[in-house]
Image (cartoon, helix red, strand yellow):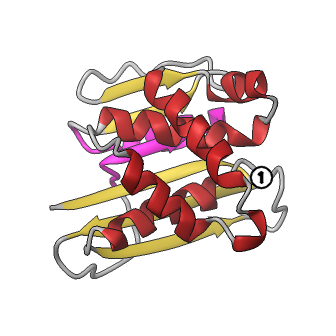
C-alpha cells in the first residue's frame, strides 16, 4: 500500500502542519514516510504545499506528480492540482474559499466549509484540522486514540493547550 497525498493552499493555513500530522501518523503506524514541504518566498499569504507519501515499501522519491489524495484550501490550488489527481482519487476542498466544483467523475470530491466552521469556533486557523478530520472520516481512519497520540507528537510542548482545541476541530471535520 502506498498513499500519495498533496496538500496545498496559502501560507499560514497550516498546510505544513497538516502534512506533518499525516507523516507522523504514518510513522506511528510503522510505515515508510516522506514529508516534503514547499512554500514561496512570501510565506504567509503566498503559496504553500506539502507532499506526504505513506507506504509499506521504502519511498524512492518524495515528489508527487499524481496524488491519490488532494487537500485544496484555496482556489488556485484547486484549479492547479485537481487535474493531476489519480483516477479513483480523493479531493477535499475548503468550500468556504473555493466556490468551484470539479467536473471530473472519476474521482471522489468532498466540499467542506472548513474556514467557516473554524470561524464559528472562534479560531479561523483551525480550518486545516477540520479538513484533516474530514479526510480521516472519508478514509475510515478516524480513531481518537491514534489522532491524540499523533497530535501529541506534532504539537510542541509549549503549545500543549492546543491539543484539545485541535482534537475538537478534527471531530467537527469528521462530522461534516
**Residue at point 64% right, 32% down?**
75
Res. 77 visible in picture: no
Left or right relative to 87: residue 15:
right
Asked whether 4 or 40 is in front, the reply is 4
**Residue at point 54% right, 28% down?**
172
Q: In the structure shown, which secondary structural element does the residue marked by tag 1 occupy?
A: loop
Residue 14, image x, y percentages: 67, 52
Residue 153, image x, y percentages: 54, 70
**Residue at point 67% right, 43% down?**
165
Left or right relative to 30: residue 91:
right
Span colored in magenta: 66-87
Task: Residue 44: name its quadrant.
Answer: bottom right
Task: Residue 169: name its quadrant.
Answer: top right
Q: Is residue 149 above or below residue 61?
A: above
Q: Is residue 89 above or below residue 2?
A: above
Q: Magenta stretch: residue 57 in it? A: no
Residue 67, image x, y percentages: 35, 52
Residue 61, image x, y percentages: 34, 79
The residue to which callout 1 is attached is 12
Quarter occupied by the N terminus: bottom left
**Residue at point 29% right, 44% down?**
141
Q: Magenta stretch: residue 73 in it? A: yes
Q: Is residue 69 above or below residue 63?
A: above
Left or right relative to 17: residue 31:
left
Asked whether 118 or 44 is in front, the reply is 118
Question: Quick one: label 1, few (<14), some, or many (20+) residues within 10 Å?
Answer: some
Amino acid at each position: 500500500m502506498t498513499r500519495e497525498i498533496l496538500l496545498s493552499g496559502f501560507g499560514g493555513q497550516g498546510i505544513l502542519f497538516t502534512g506533518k500530522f499525516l507523516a507522523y501518523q504514518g510513522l506511528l503506524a510503522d510505515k515508510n514516510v516522506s514529508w516534503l514541504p514547499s512554500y514561496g518566498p512570501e510565506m504567509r499569504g503566498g503559496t504553500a504545499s506539502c507532499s506526504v507519501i505513506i507506504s509499506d515499501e521504502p519511498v524512492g522519491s518524495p515528489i508527487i506528480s499524481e496524488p491519490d489524495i488532494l487537500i485544496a484550501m484555496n482556489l488556485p490550488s484547486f484549479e492547479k492540482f485537481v487535474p493531476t489527481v489519480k483516477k479513483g482519487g480523493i479531493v477535499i476542498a475548503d468550500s468556504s474559499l473555493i466556490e468551484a466544483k470539479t467536473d471530473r467523475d472519476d474521482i471522489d470530491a468532498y466540499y467542506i466549509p472548513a474556514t467557516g466552521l473554524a470561524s464559528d469556533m472562534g479560531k479561523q486557523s483551525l480550518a486545516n484540522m477540520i479538513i484533516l478530520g474530514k479526510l480521516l472520516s472519508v478514509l475510515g481512519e478516524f480513531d481518537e486514540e491514534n489522532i491524540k497520540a499523533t497530535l501529541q507528537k506534532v504539537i510542541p510542548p509549549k503549545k500543549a493547550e492546543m491539543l484539545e482545541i485541535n482534537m475538537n476541530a478534527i471531530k467537527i471535520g469528521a462530522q461534516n
